[in-house]
Image (spheres, helix red, strand yellow):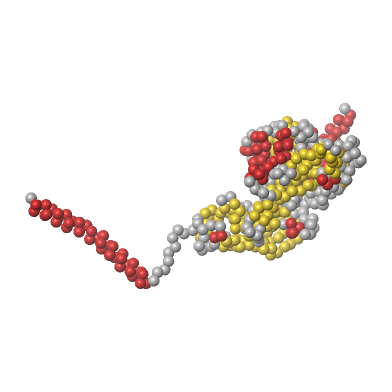
Amino acid sequence: MRRILIIVLVLAAFAMLLPINAGYEGHVEIKGVVPEPQNITFGIYTGGSTEIPLGNFSILKNVIKGRGFNIKNITDLTELGELEGVDVLALLTIKNLTNDEINIIRNYSFYGGDLFIITPQEIDKGMEDLLSLFGLESLGYVKDNESYYENESNVILNKTWEASSIMNGIKSLLVVNATALNYTEKNGLLEFLGINETMSLNNETNVSILYLNNLVWGGNNTYVEYKKGQRIYGQNITLCHIQEYWFGAKIVVISSAYMFEDEYIIKKRFDNLKFLERLIYWLGDQINYMAIDIVDRNPSENTLDLDQSPYINISFDIKITNITDNDFKSNLTVLVGFEYLGKFRGVKLPTLTNETYDNTHNNATLRYKVQLNISEIINKSAVIYVRIVAAMPLYGYRWNKPIRLDVIKQRFEFQRYHPVLLTIGAIVGINLIVLIGLMPYALKRRMRAKKIEEKAKK
């Protein structure tokens, strides 16, 4: 009873501090680049059964609210409309997911919705199906019988992750009752869409449409017995997996059911709380963000005559936050083209013309220019959209707001003719007019002659 009372008091004190402590190490707000937190909504699914009561994730909820984001309780997943306005859907140790619910989650992701999944300790059929939607499987329980904190299923990790802005300032994590994740390359979402992990835009350009990142893995003493007598160790054990899709969706899977549970997240020896904050900020587009701003477009009109204005010249900026790698441009992909009939066409690689850096805040602004040719994709009147995509691992795929163009193609093109042809045409036209004018008179004479002939026969 005393232990419970202490935990309750600590939670209450911590919850009071959250709204005040909105800034933390490694976070710099860039006004005009990242979205305002109040415009981002996290949806927490409360309608299904959970392995851990949702009340045990009160700190997680307070982190979301304390950082300025909105929270919406989702009580039903039978219709996609239930997720309207939700930017990130959180599934916290959900069990007994139905096929209908998984289909809604699939469609939500396809339309660019982000997912924050904390798997239950006991992976049931519903969770297996959800993981397979993203090409993941559970290999078994993660254990560490040499450096464990309380028992061998409480695994301590020290720096078993790559340096990135998401993991900035994180030194040690306590992973509790986790299962190992494995990417099978059989991605159910891509199979449903009928696409591969790479896409050919033209004969010269192949782009990845999916970024995979094993964000946190096991230590040297960490093992999983995935089959009787067969074990995997260390970096082969994935405990936090991230996916980023071409259509904008970001998926975070945490395979430790208790890692962010109230009792464990407050343990001061470990950085579980800071890790949660970093993930929430990343999912909420506050770190590792790219913004696309159109600087100039010529012609600037939105209605264009295809014969007179087949070319469009565009200048635009890409603003990138939280740069930690001086060689980041080698991982950056920027493409410009047209969206027409649901496909990305006439794609060009823009030219980098200028770059500026804010070394204090580790931000960059890259300016590009490109010329697009409308006639490469259509030769008729149509509605098309100018689309720009900037993509980089752990930054995802960022698209500009579509620019609508109403393209008009004249049905007839009047040509200049030789004077002789014009004269002949005029003579033919005059003769036709005379013929039409004399036709009634000729018919009248013919009728009169016919009557005279009939009288003569009588």
Farthest-out residue, top: 1
Q: Position of residue 181 (x, y in %)?
A: 78, 42
In front of the other: 93 or 169: 93
Number of numbered discs: 0
Whether residue 300 is situated above or below residue 282 in the rendered picture: below
Q: Write the residue at 79% across / 47% down.
A: 215
Residue 411 lies left or right of residue 362; in this view the side is: left
Q: Position of residue 266 (x, y in %)?
A: 85, 39
Whether residue 430 is situated above or below residue 398 in the rendered picture: below
Farthest-out residue, front: 229
In front of the other: 31 or 165: 165
Q: Write the residue at 80% across / 44% down.
A: 238
Q: Position of residue 443 (x, y in %)?
A: 20, 56
Farthest-out residue, right: 146
Q: Write the residue at 82% across / 44% down.
A: 237
Farthest-out residue, bottom: 419
Q: Quadrant of the N terminus?
A: top right
Q: Position of residue 405 (x, y in %)?
A: 55, 55
Q: Write the residue at 42% across / 66% down.
A: 415
Residue 396 lies left or right of residue 265; in this view the side is: left
Whether residue 171 is situated above or below residue 424 in the rendered picture: above
Query: In this rendering, does residue 100 appear at all?
Result: yes
Query: In this rendering, does residue 142 appear at all?
Result: no
In front of the other: 58 or 250: 250
